[in-house]
Amino acid sequence: MEPTKPTSDSTQPTRAKSRNIPEGDQEFSEAFDLMTAEWGLRPQLTLEWTTQSKASTLATQLRESLRSTGEAGDSITPQSRRLGELDKMIDGSKEEGKLKYVRKALALRYDEENDGKPYYGEFGIEKIGSEYTLPHDRGKRAKALLKLVKALARPEHGLKEGKYGHAFWKQISDEYNQLQGQLEKDKGIRATEVGDKNQYRQEAEAIFVAILLLLQANYPKTYKAERRKFGVLKESY
């Protein structure tokens, strides 16, 4: 269902600086839930550009978008952690990094050709700063791993076998590319959900402010007490 969109009438309340609006998304969502519920008990209170029913739907959309955004963020964390572990396995410390064995194998194979450096590009290796390694950008690193595996399989290099040969790097490449692809997909989903959440909140705030003003207009002497019934549980946030 599409977010409830108020008309572009110039009389529509815009987002206002108000100490009555909770800053946190979760806190605001809870307050907006209370507001829409109480509004349902006051049919005499109306706004020309939206209704209580639409506001209630918007409250549900905002609440669900917050849950979805959190879940998408949770799924990204373990993938990023594992990619970090694989990065260390590729070019981490002296004890962890294994790419050095590929460079050493090339140096032994092509010791008369500048220690094999002319072949680095074929293996996905490039100079970064003072070191020769795979690209640091994970998207580019995933592609470089594919090049590395392909090059190791070529018989003319004679580097397919061995502890850190083709089989070792193919396993790393397969996992790295799978994780990186899923991570990018999840980031895209998260970006979309964050955008939806921000849109829902902006629309909900416009209604929230309008109801606060409506209460002040209808209950000039007791509007602060009425606001508390509508979800404004504190004088300021």
Image (spheres, rainbow, N blue to C red):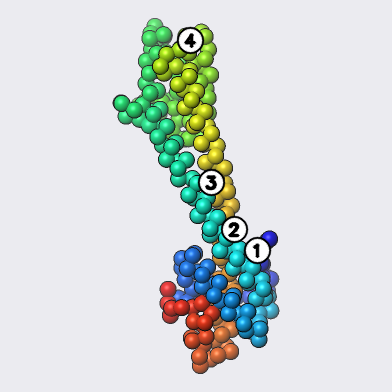
Name the residue tied to disc 4: 157
Q: CA distance from mark 3 to mark 1?
A: 22 Å
Amino acid at circle 3: Lys
Element on which disc 2 rests: helix
In the picture, the disc for residue 187 is: 3
For residue 203, which quarter of the picture?
bottom right
Q: Label 4: few (<14), some or many (≥20) within 10 Å?
A: some
Q: CA distance from mark 1 to mark 2?
A: 8 Å
Of label 4 and label 1, which has the lower sequence position?
1
Q: Label 1: few (<14), some or many (≥20) within 10 Å?
A: some
Of label 3 and label 2, which has the lower sequence position?
3
Amino acid at circle 2: Asp
In the picture, the disc for residue 196 is: 2
Q: Quadrant of the C terminus?
A: bottom left
Q: CA distance from mark 3 to mark 4?
A: 38 Å
Q: Label 3: few (<14), some or many (≥20) within 10 Å?
A: some
In the picture, the disc for residue 3 is: 1
